[in-house]
């Protein structure tokens, strides 16, 4: 049985370690975001390792969003599901126009914060 966090061994549907790695990545990111609530204009970049397919990045993001959706936020606080959401996912195999992304993310920060 193959064991890899990348979950990219064809034709195996789910490799050992991939789901656990995604859960741990999501939990780590949730802790980092919780620490950042003191500054609502903070941009956090969380880098996930992986190979070629972007599986770990996508799976960690999905699990993190599940965590956020399951939480209840007091309406009196500035921290809510929108401020804690993921606003970009970049996968190294795909090109990114960093200038356009900067403009897009600033607009999101202006609207959400």
Image (cartoon, rainbow, N blue to C red):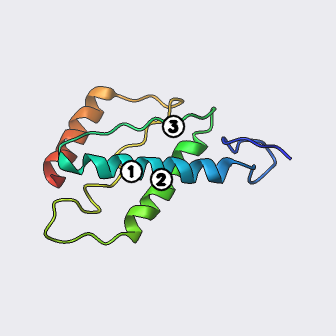
Quadrant for residue 98, please give it: top left
Residue 101 rendering spot, x and y as whole percentages: 29, 35
User: Image check: 18 left or right of 107?
Assistant: right
| Mark 1 in CB contact with mark 2 (< 8 angstroms) | yes
Q: Secondary structure at mark 3?
A: loop
Q: From mark 3 to mark 1, how far is it between C-alphas?
A: 15 Å
Q: Which mark is residue 27?
A: 2
Residue 53 shows in the view? yes
Q: Earlier in the sequence, mark 3 or mark 2?
A: 2
33 is higher (above) or lower (below) than 94: below
Q: Residue furthest right?
A: 1
Residue 59 shows in the view? no
Residue neighbourhood size for the residue with mark 1, other residues' Cα within 10 Å, grouped as few (<14), some (14–19), many (≥20): few
The residue drawn where x is 58% and y is 44% is 56
Q: To which residue does mark 3 refer?
A: 48
Q: To which residue does mark 1 refer?
A: 31
Q: From mark 1 to mark 2, how far is it between C-alphas?
A: 6 Å
Residue 25 rendering spot, x and y as whole percentages: 51, 47
Q: From mark 3 to mark 2, how far is it between C-alphas?
A: 13 Å
User: Image check: 76 left or right of 2?
Assistant: left
Residue 28 rendering spot, x and y as whole percentages: 46, 47
Residue 104 rendering spot, x and y as whole percentages: 24, 40
Quadrant for residue 107, please give it: top left
Q: Which mark is residue 56?
A: none
User: Image check: 103 left or right of 5?
Assistant: left
């Amino acid at each position: 049985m193959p064991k890899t966090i990348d979950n990219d061994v064809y034709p195996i549907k789910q490799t050992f370690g991939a789901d656990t790695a995604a859960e741990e990545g999501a939990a780590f990111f949730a802790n980092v975001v919780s620490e950042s609530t003191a500054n609502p204009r903070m941009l956090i970049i969380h880098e996930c390792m992986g190979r070629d397919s972007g599986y770990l990045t996508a799976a960690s993001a999905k699990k993190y969003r599940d965590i956020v959706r399951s939480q209840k936020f007091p309406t009196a606080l500035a921290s809510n599901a929108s401020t804690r959401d993921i606003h970009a996912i970049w996968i190294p195999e795909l090109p990114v126009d960093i200038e356009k992304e900067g403009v897009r993310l600033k607009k999101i920060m202006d609207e959400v914060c």
